[in-house]
Structure formats: C-alpha cells, structure tokens
Amino acid sequence: MGGIGPMSLIIIGIVALLIFGPKKLPELGKAMGSTLREFKNATRGLADDDDTNQEKKKL
C-alpha cells in the first residue's frame, strides 16, 4: 500500500486552510508539535522504566 504522496499533502493543506484559516494554522501546528514531543518523552520514560525493571530482576 502506498503512503501519502505530495498531492495528498497539498489537498490536506488546502482543506485545513479552508477550515481553520491562516491565523489558526500556526497555533495548531505548535500544539501538535508539543503533543508529539510529550508523547515521545512519555514513551521514552516507559522504555527506561522497563529497562530498569529488567536490570533489577537480573540482580
């Protein structure tokens, strides 16, 4: 199955511009970026906790 191509991204961008307007798009992008950053930190924290638990079991 194919991924999202450049034409699809353009269409999604145009639809987002029509729905939210040019003033809201930067705010939405910033919010999405911070949400993604928090998610990555949380999953990294879970992986670190899992590694720590495995080391404790070995001892």
Image (tube, rainbow, N blue to C red):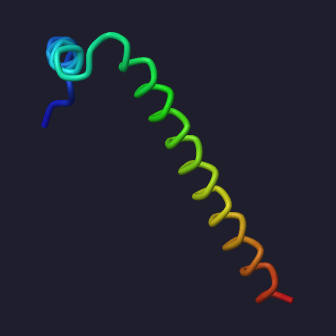
Residue in the image at 68% along x and 61% along y: 45
Q: Quadrant of residue 29?
A: top left
Residue under the point 37% across and 20% down:
24
Q: Could you tell me which quadrant the C terminus lies in?
A: bottom right
For residue 44, above or below residue 16: below
Residue 7: quarter of image: top left
Q: Relative to 34, is 6 on the left or the right?
A: left
Say whether residue 4 is left or right of residue 51.
Answer: left
Q: Is residue 23 left or right of residue 35?
A: left
* Front-most of residues 48 and 26: 26
Q: Farthest residue in the right direction? A: 59
Residue 26 position within the rendered picture, expressed as x and y whole percent measured from the top left = 44, 18
Image-based side of 21 in relation to 59, left or right: left
Instruction: Please state the total of marks drawn on the protein image.
Output: 0
Q: Position of residue 3 (x, y in %)?
A: 20, 30
Q: Quadrant of residue 1?
A: top left
Q: Residue at x 55, y 37 (%)?
A: 34
Q: Nearer the viewer, residue 29 or 9?
A: 29
The one nearer the camera, 50 or 42, is: 42
